[in-house]
């Protein structure tokens, strides 16, 4: 080891420094202290690089007041199979039950309806008609392969399938991202295609025809395709701030109508007409062209992290919406954190949304599905998490959601409670 | 939906004719591990493995000793309100070391001086604290006021410890120890300008290290992010190298340049020292302590380093 005196920088001996006490030689003492310290603890290889499996699991409970209840367990497994190369698998099971608004309006007398399976149910005076036969179990599987395509380009390729008793869906997706500008900028493009089959119970009713047990149908297996394309850029703005901007475009084609939704037909006095044609099956266009722009920023304070996002959505059904979402991860110390969440969603109705139809009107398309009407949804939630050693994390999230109808949409508010428990592990 | 990737754990790897250059971020600094090799394909996965190990170690040390976190022993100590805190083996080694350095330097190296940062914010402004502000804080500084009886540390209320002065250098040396236990390759560790080289490269040469010239961007702090050309190249074959002083962190008032290095005895920033001092020693930690103590000698810095018989550069 060569540690000779270097002549590149000679100090100028000023008169002051000459008269000063000669500096002490302390290097040996420092050397000994340093080597003692470095020898006090044996070096240990902490190889997080060895953990090649990641498992995420969660169970979600969703409950609307007097309406739908859902339980949804999810398990995700991801394994590193090579350098920056991963395969992943996800299984989701949904179990829904309860009552769902059928689209008809509340009236001042009791109303009786025929359910898709042919049985009947009655809504009491002044009550929004709810179809109580709503129950479903869905299983969805997703497989994913993530691989570097070059030094700066990464590809994610996935296939998915889901099945429930009246709906099947199969899809493929590809997502390419490119890091450049010292990895401070990432460009992303994604393409996804899904082919779905709708198999309504009792067949798909002919749109805008009278609701009846002996309805005319337009088939029992109807197809629908969904194609989505996305362009995005993620930019590291500063050491602590990341910003993302996406544009996505989607095209739906095929049977887009809800076979179980109906509309009430009123006379000029606002009363349900008498006789046949009181309730008509809804009918939606067979194409839908969707667009969304999305902006998100993540800022890390010394410990805490703020996620803020805004999304604007619009489509050629005339529906548009604004979503603002904010989460703040507050570190409590020792691996505990709390994350409050606020979400505000505001939607303007589709052109063919009608709270009800008026007798004699002959619209081309019509739906009274409250989810296509004017609506504001506010969500408040909080998540608690604890990050444990060995790559384990527990989370619990509770949220309260309120959907308030607006404009011509005179339906009742929908309140829901969401509870989610999660556990993840790396090994 | 596109997920924002977790960039904090990202790591890059690049082949540079004769060695692998890997990069990641830790301790608020760009970190580099260079691994000597004459066979690109054979050494790639080994190089990546070494980089990941070093990254883990750097992140571990950052997490364990950062004063900005609330989930570590440093936080517990600084919020102990005068109660004794049980110290683990590794921190005990560092506290023993801090004690030795405090004694050897006659109190110039003091890990309790960090509270002065409440007053001194080195943002290149002219915001200089007054003596009236500094004086009360001095009561809460002094390693001699601390009771350190292994394994218990009792810090008087109002005092704090801060290992920021040696953390990066310590991480370099620890990472070097670990890499040495798993590789026979020559490597260079560079955590934000603090370096260590384990042994000469296969061609018997050292690693060429640029010693930055801090003079260039003095007048305009907007230029601070501009990459500056090193003004000296030095061949480091073995040992540690550390630099104290930083042209990007200072205060300037009435023509006096206040360095971000503070004298724990007076509470004042040093003004007469070179802008930066780079020292080469057996380990990075030792180089770091020597360069810091040299800064605190102010205009006698070079004289002090001459006496220590080390290779150094003063700017």
Image: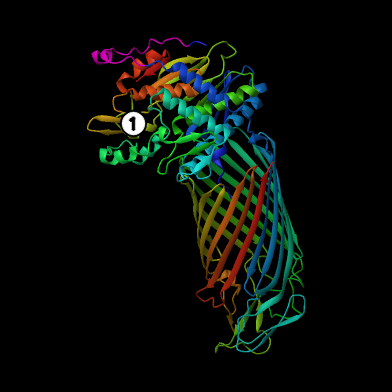
Residue with the mark numbered 1 = B265
Residue at (42, 44) in percent of width and height: B157
> Which quarter of the image is occupied by the C terminus of chain A?
top right
Q: Can residue B283 be seen in this snapshot?
A: no
In reply to whether residue A10 is colored magenta, the answer given is yes
Which SS class for mark 1? loop
* Front in this rendered view, residue B161 or B207: B161
What x and y, as percent, mark residue A394?
Answer: 63, 52
Which quadrant of the structure image shows residue A104?
bottom right
- The reply to whether the magenta stretch includes residue B182 is no
| Residue B270 x/y as whole percent | 31, 28
Report x, y in % for residue A396: 61, 57
Seen in the picture, residue A148 relative to B97 is either above or below; the reply is: below
Report how many numbered discs are placed on residues in the image: 1
Q: Residue at x 43, y 19 (%)?
A: B279
Give the image's coloring scheme. Answer: rainbow
A411 over A350 or under it: above or below: below
Q: On the rendered structure, is A34 left or right of A87?
A: left
User: Which residue is drawn at the image coordinates 68% and 35% (left, top)?
Assistant: A50
Residue A6 relative to residue A86: left or right: left
Nearest to the observer: residue B76 or residue A180: B76
Q: Chain of mark 1?
A: B
Give whichever of A14, B76 is nearer the camera: B76
Label 1, residues with CA under 10 Å away: few <14, some 14-19, many ≥20:
some
Q: Position of residue A167 (x, y in %)?
A: 73, 63
Magenta residues span A3-23
List the single residue furthest toward the left.
Answer: B254
The answer to whether residue A221 of the structure is visible from this angle is yes
């Amino acid at each position: 080891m060569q540690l000779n005196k270097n002549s590149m920088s000679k100090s100028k001996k000023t008169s002051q420094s000459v008269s000063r006490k000669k500096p002490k030689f302390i290097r040996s003492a420092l050397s000994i202290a340093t080597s003692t310290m470095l020898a006090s603890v044996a070096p240990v290889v902490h190889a997080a690089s060895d953990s090649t499996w990641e498992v995420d699991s969660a169970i979600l409970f969703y409950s609307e007041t007097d309406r739908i209840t859902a339980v949804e367990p999810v398990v995700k497994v991801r394994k590193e199979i090579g350098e920056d190369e991963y395969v992943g698998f996800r299984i989701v099971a949904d179990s829904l039950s309860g009552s769902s608004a059928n689209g008809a309006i509340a009236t001042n007398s009791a109303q009786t309806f025929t359910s898709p399976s042919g049985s009947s149910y009655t809504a009491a005076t002044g009550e929004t008609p709810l179809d109580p036969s709503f129950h479903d179990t869905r299983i969805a599987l997703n497989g994913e392969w993530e691989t570097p395509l070059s030094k700066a380009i990464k590809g994610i390729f996935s296939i998915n399938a889901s099945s429930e008793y009246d709906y099947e869906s199969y899809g493929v997706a590809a997502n390419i991202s490119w890091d450049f500008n010292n990895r401070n900028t990432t460009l992303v493009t994604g393409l996804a295609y899904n082919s779905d089959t709708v198999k309504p119970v009792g067949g798909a009713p002919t749109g805008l025809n009278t609701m009846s047990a002996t309805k005319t149908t337009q088939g029992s297996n109807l197809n629908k395709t969904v194609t989505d394309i996305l362009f995005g850029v993620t930019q590291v703005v500063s050491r602590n701030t990341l910003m993302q901007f996406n544009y996505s475009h989607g095209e739906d084609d095929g049977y887009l109508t809800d076979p179980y939704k109906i509309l009430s037909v009123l006379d000029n006095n606002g009363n349900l007409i008498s006789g046949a044609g009181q309730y008509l099956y809804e009918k939606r266009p067979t194409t839908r062209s969707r667009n969304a722009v999305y902006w998100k920023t993540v800022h890390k304070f010394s410990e805490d992290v703020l996620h803020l996002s805004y999304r604007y959505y619009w489509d050629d059904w005339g529906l548009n919406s604004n979503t603002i979402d904010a989460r703040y991860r507050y570190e409590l110390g020792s691996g505990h954190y709390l994350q409050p969440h606020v979400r505000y969603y505001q939607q303007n109705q589709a052109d063919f949304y009608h709270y009800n139809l008026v007798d004699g009107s002959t619209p081309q398309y019509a739906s009274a599905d409250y989810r296509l009407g004017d609506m504001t949804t506010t969500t408040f939630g909080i998540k608690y998490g604890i990050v444990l050693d060995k790559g384990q994390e527990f989370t619990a999230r509770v949220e309260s959601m309120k959907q308030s109808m607006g404009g011509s949409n005179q339906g009742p508010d929908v309140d829901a409670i969401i509870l989610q428990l999660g556990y993840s592990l790396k090994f | 939906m596109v997920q924002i990737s977790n960039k904090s754990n990202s790591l890059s790897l690049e082949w540079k004719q004769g060695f692998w250059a890997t990069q990641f971020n830790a301790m608020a600094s760009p970190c580099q591990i260079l691994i000597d090799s004459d066979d690109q394909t054979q050494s790639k996965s080994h190089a990546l493995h070494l980089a990941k190990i070093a990254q883990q170690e750097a992140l571990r040390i950052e997490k364990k000793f950062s004063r900005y976190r609330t989930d570590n022993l440093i936080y517990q100590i600084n919020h102990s309100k005068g109660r004794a805190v049980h110290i683990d083996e590794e921190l005990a080694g560092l506290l023993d070391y801090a004690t030795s350095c405090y004694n050897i330097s006659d109190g110039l190296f003091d890990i309790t001086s960090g509270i002065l940062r409440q007053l001194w914010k080195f943002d290149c402004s002219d915001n200089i604290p007054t003596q009236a502000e500094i004086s009360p804080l001095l009561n809460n500084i002094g390693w001699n006021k601390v009771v350190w009886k292994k394994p218990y540390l009792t810090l008087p209320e109002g005092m704090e410890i801060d290992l920021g002065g040696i953390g990066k250098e310590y991480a370099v040396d620890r990472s070097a120890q670990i890499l040495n236990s798993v590789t026979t390759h020559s490597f260079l560790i560079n955590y934000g300008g603090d370096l260590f080289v384990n042994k000469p490269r296969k061609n018997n040469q050292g690693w060429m290290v640029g010693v930055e010239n801090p003079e260039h961007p003095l007048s305009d702090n907007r230029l601070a992010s501009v990459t500056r050309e090193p003004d000296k190249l030095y061949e480091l074959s073995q040992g540690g190298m550390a630099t104290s002083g930083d042209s990007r962190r200072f205060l300037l008032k009435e023509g006096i340049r206040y360095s971000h290095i503070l004298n724990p005895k007076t509470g004042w920033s040093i003004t007469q020292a070179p802008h930066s001092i780079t020292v080469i020693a057996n380990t990075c930690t030792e180089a770091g302590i020597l360069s810091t103590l040299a800064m605190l000698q102010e205009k006698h810095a070079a004289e002090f380093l001459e006496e220590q018989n080390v290779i150094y550069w003063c700017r």
